[in-house]
Amino acid sequence: MDRVGAHVGVHGEDEHSVTHLFEAEHAGYRGWNWAVTVASAGDDSPVSVSEVVLLPGQDALVAPEWVPWSERVRAGDLGVGDLLPPRPDDPRLVEAYVQSDDPAIEEVALEIGLGRTRVLSREGRLEAAERWAGSDFGPRSDMARSAPAHCGTCGFYTRVAGAFGASFGVCANEISPADGHVVHVEYGCGAHSQVEVETGPMVPVADLVYDDAQLDVSE
């Protein structure tokens, strides 16, 4: 065994074996230790080496804990041609036959085969609504707080259908930074359809003007 450093510790494994720790002086293994386990059957028995392994110490540089790919992927990671299927147990999706809370609608849709295989679950809708409301186009963004009015009163606001319709829509104003994005009904910007800009003179003009260029002389 080469590149063995100083002895740094020892701990017992059981009644007949202990493990000694030595610093590892291999390049790239800072903080790692050689763990040498030795054993003996008794006082008069020879000591034998049972195992020699390289183990990380408290300050060792180790690889991060493995994370499944489904938990590593983040928004914006999907590129052109990439495929990202949902998890089989994705809580954001439910079977389409539970889409409506109206039994009559469900029965008719099932009979004629309408709808999709899977749709957003209640959890999926709440998660999306929370994410959108906290985005740059939500009611608490800097743009919304400084806007003269909200999207709900704007002519460029196109309300979406379905469960999101009460709170979200799509901006259709090409001048707005939110054009083509899902916006909260209480979002707003300076391109609101009702915005008016005063075009009067920059310097206020008094109603009564005195002409002091001419003097009236009376005798």
Image: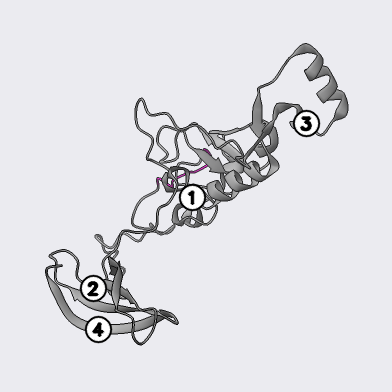
- First along the sequence among labels 3 and 4: 4
The tag on residue 38 is none
Q: Which residue is mark 4?
A: 8
Q: Residue at x 28, y 63 (%)?
A: 212
Q: Is disc 4 placed on a helix, strand or loop?
A: strand
Between 6 and 201, the residue placed more toward the observer is 6
How many other residues sit within 10 Å of disc 3, few (<14), some (14-19) or many (≥20)?
few
Determine the image quadrant of residue 116: top right
Check the picture and name the quadrant holding the N terminus.
Answer: bottom left
Q: Which mark is residue 31?
A: 2
| Rendered-image quadrant of the C terminus | bottom left
Q: Nearer the viewer, mark 4 or mark 2?
A: 4
Determine the CA span between mark 4 and mark 1.
52 Å
The span from disc 4 to disc 2 (Cα, nearest Å) is: 11 Å
Provide the residue designation for mark 1.
135
Tell me which amino acid carries mark 2.
Gly
Residue 219 showing in the rendered view: no
Which of the 4 image quadrants contains residue 48?
A: bottom left
Image coordinates of residue 17 in percent, x first then y, are 38, 78
Q: Is residue 211 visible?
A: yes
